[in-house]
Amino acid sequence: MGLKNKPNYLRWIVYLILFIALLFIPRILSIHDLMLFEYGLTFAIVGLGFNLLLGYTGLLSFGHGAYFAAGAYSVAMIAKYLPQAYSIEIVIPAALFFSLILSIIFGFVCVRHTKIFFSILALSLSMLLFALLFKLYHITGGSDGLRVPLPTMFGFSFKGIRRPEFLSGTYYYFLLAMFAISFVVMKGIVSSPFGKALQAIRDNEVRAELIGIRVRRYRLYAFCISGMFVGLGGALWTFVNGHVTADLSHWVFSGEIVYMTLLGGFGIFEGPIVGAMIFTYLKLYAMGHTEYWMFVIGATLIVLVLLLPSGVAGAFSTLWRRTIKGN
Amino acid sequence: MTKEVSRRKFLKYMGATALTAGSLGTTSKVWGQAKPIPKDPIKIAAVSFLTGAAAAPFGIPGDNTYKMCADMINKEGGILGRKIDLQSKDEAGGVDAQVKLCRKLILEDKVDVVLGYISSASCLAVLPLSDELGGLIIAYDCGTHELMEGAKSPFDIPKFKLGFRSKAHLGIDNIALALYIKKYYPNIKKVAGINQDYAWGRDSWLIFETAMKKLMPQVQVVKTLWPPLGNTDFTAHISALMGSEPDIVHSSLWGGDAVTFSKQALGMGFFKKIRMAYSRGEPYPQEVGKDYPEGQIICCAGTHYFLHTPKDKTSADLQKTFVTEYHKRYGKYPSYPCYHAYQAIYAYKHAVEKASNAAGGGWPTIEAISKALTGLSFPTPSGILTIREDHNGYEDCLVGVSKLTPKYPFPILDKTEVFPAAQVNPPVGTKTVDWINSWK
Amino acid sequence: MWIIYTLNGLYFAALLFLISLGLNIILGVMGILNLAHGSLYAIGAFIAAWIIIAIGAKIPPFFLYITLLSGFVLTGIVGLIMEKSLIRFMYKRTLEYQLLLTFGALMLLEDVIKMIWGGQAYYASAPFDLLGKADIFGHVYPTYFLFVMIIALIAGLLIWLFMSKTKLGIMLRAISLDREMATGIGLDINRLSTFAFVLGSALAGLAGALVVPTTPALLGFGHEPLILGFIVVVVGGLGSLKGALVGALLVGFTRSFGIAIFPEIELPLLFLIAGIILVVKPEGLFGR
């Protein structure tokens, strides 16, 4: 995948430089743009998780909003029903746990299928969660959703601090750390034997079966890991957004996750991260500048599908390789 | 306090950027340090439904009124000499889109005040942003009583330092309906409810049911239905209601839903046996026209009715000009969202002037405007409006029954009854439900 | 009252049947799940409402009902344009691109509707009002709902006759059964696919046109029917016409009786039934 001809350590040096650059982002961006950047970071984690399934296992889920919602609602529900436990070091593991449980249940049903059957099934199941979140008004707040206050963080309370201050200070670095950890872990997963097995399944299911890979079980593992990453993204997103609604589990939201991944390019490990960033800015700026923002996003998607199927990062990578060869 | 400071220092150290708006903790002087009046216009964002089912009966009339009032204020010289630059924004797109929009309005566009929100869901999500971001937000039309109430009574007031609602909450509509039913239909046996499945519908029914239990304990609730907002097919709901044979059906349906429901219910012979009680039914007779069934109980969400003459002389004059001017401009009579829009924009105007006077001139700080809004009382076309210490409006409420007359091409309200504010609003700091349950 | 609940269920099922029939024809013949199907339904509704408002008062009542067919014809044309300009390029592409393209089309069409018709509601209730009410065992019921059921029944019968008796229909079925084999025996897959997409779109448009006299046409009109259409397709079996009928009836009755008996959980109940069917019979009731 990606820039295979480049030596490995060089790649990690680039990552490190980029990471250090990210540390200075709050000093550069205005508060509004910084919040957008944080949305982008959370979706980058979502994209990493989603791409394990799409890019590496070859399964297209149109229902990953469900695991995002599982993470987000874990946070919101703890804030509402267990306020004494509402600290970030408790809610994040809780969000991981609940998105894992949900992806085990849904994944068990879904991985029996592939292709479009898998997509539709994932979609239907996420809509089941949507229907529950939507209808159980007294518990989940229905379409009004739930508000998410600022959590305590390793003993620190943020009472009396405004959300923008919280987000531009401590939380940004926490988010960045979570992103870095997710990045490294996911990188480890895809280059491990397990990751290679998934790619073998993607490329040829029958051959994978023949060389002794337990296809369905591996798919389920991939599904669960993917669900947990997406759930983590959802949990981290709630603190930025401050509010969760049932729409998170709606298939249109799942569609946006697919969109971001494709926008960046699912053939490349870093693709979904690029896609998440571009999509966040594209959507917000389109919304801010035209009444017809859906037209802009829809048209962009169509152009992308027709002309740039490997995504933005994919196109750059091809371009890069060509220049190197040209030299 | 020291811990607070050290935490702030800690945050700074961690890279927190200083915010431009004044911090909440620093209002040391009562009326603040007013700055000289700026030359540029006041940026007011008005958020209403401009597209979708709620646009025609609510959003557009509300938005039209904002424009009309801004023109009227600008013609008279603006607020403290500053003209109003009104920006109309769309409330469509769901709660999450509204949170993002409001954040952009306050942080990036730096508007002076956000007036808006028709849906209770929008209000519940957006009002907390006022204190979070340090921007003034005045809710103008949404109803849920939970917006300004705490978890249990007595609760701390105000809930939001910079968040207001320039109207009374849905308690007045539903308590007035219950009182009206007790007075005019004392012999009914069964009621049912059809309300939209979110805060507005749920809370409307809660207050109505609680009030009915207290006022007419013999009445039985036979069915409660919760169609989603924007439902297009009510046939199943209509027949389910008819099947349970209630005398009166309570409903807070609004927007296109109320029109669709009426239309389909007419086709199924619903109104022959059942009477509706609409907690916010005032715009629909005009919207539907002469087909609108007679004999339906309709509440005006206050005394916001174009044929109502307030007792207060100044208000009565305002009402006359308001109705004529609106009808001249838009060819319709103002419906209750129009009155609500008037209340919001004029509340801001009066508060700014009051705060400026108190500070001895100049443009007041946001905290001073907030302080001036608290306890503000001023004449509006539908009577004197007071904004209480809980940052919530305090109003009378008018209920009547639809009746066709030769004078108007749609049914008007007959047998009207005005319930005084003290009878339908809970006291400051008491939860509405607790207050109703404490009735003797 | 039970008879009215049943009629409500049938009425709702009739509309869903038309929507999911279109969805299933496209899915069966082309292997593409059209996420923009709901938008086509909305376009049918807007077109019909627009025409009824413009000329409804000037023409005799009989023609008023003919104007409802405009939703069928004109949405079919929209489908044709869509197929020729977008879908055409997707036949050889993989699943993710096909789905995302129709997802893009969904967003695009949503705003195209907004550009053409604006944000307001279109009320076109003349066909509903004119038919009046029928008396069914002592219950009042709008005749228009019966009219919708009859139209859906006729449409269903015609499609069935078409698929089983005409050459074109048999060719379409051949493609949905085995695409490679169909190519092998020399069928013009591209033209047949165009035809299937146009027919599917037109059916969605017809459903939209039929519903608009009972409720105003609005932005976001197609969202709910699309989701229910998905459920019908999944439960009935992907690409199965019989499945569309049975699935639509199941969803229609669950909704009607659900609201009457368990109003609090009607929607989750629907998804739950769908979920159980899928666990027990993953390919749907009539899937292959």
Image (cartoon, coloured by chain):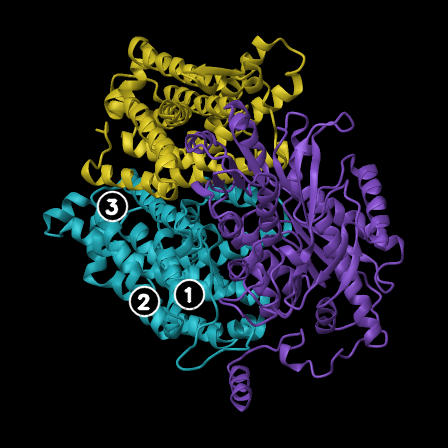
The residue depicted at 38 percent of the width and 15 percent of the height is C153
**Could you say where residue A178 lies in the image, as x and y percent from the top left?**
38, 70
Q: Colour of chain B?
A: purple
**Same chain letter for marks 2 and 1:** yes
Report the residue at 66% width, 68% height from top.
B389
The residue closer to the viewer here, B224 or A111, is: B224
The quarter of the picture where the C terminus of chain B appears is bottom right
Picture quadrant where residue A10 is located: bottom left
Q: In the shown orientation, is residue B204 left or right of residue B242? A: right
Tell me if C262 is positioned left or right of C140 in this view.
Answer: left
Tell me the CA gap for discs 3 and 2.
24 Å
Q: Amino acid at mark 1?
A: Lys
| Residue position marked by numbered label 2 in the rendering | A94
Name the colour assigned to chain C in the rendering.
Answer: yellow
Q: Which residue is pictured at 17% across the width and 52% down the height?
A: A217
Would you name the residue on which mark 1 appears?
A: A80
The alpha-carbon separation of the residues under discs 2 and 1 comes to 14 Å
Q: Nearer the viewer, residue B127 or B190?
A: B190
Q: Nearer the viewer, residue A135 or A20?
A: A135
Identify the colour of chain A in the image.
cyan
Q: Are marks 3 and 2 on the same chain?
A: yes
Please name whichever residue, B380 or C15, is drawn nearer the observer in this view of the structure: B380
Which residue is labeled 3 in the image?
Answer: A110
Specify whether disc 3 shares its chain with disc 1.
yes
User: Looking at the image, can residue B432 be seen?
Assistant: yes
Q: Label 2: how many residues lie within 10 Å, few (<14), some (14-19) or many (20+)? A: many
Q: Earlier in the sequence, mark 3 or mark 1?
A: 1
Q: Amino acid at mark 3?
A: Cys
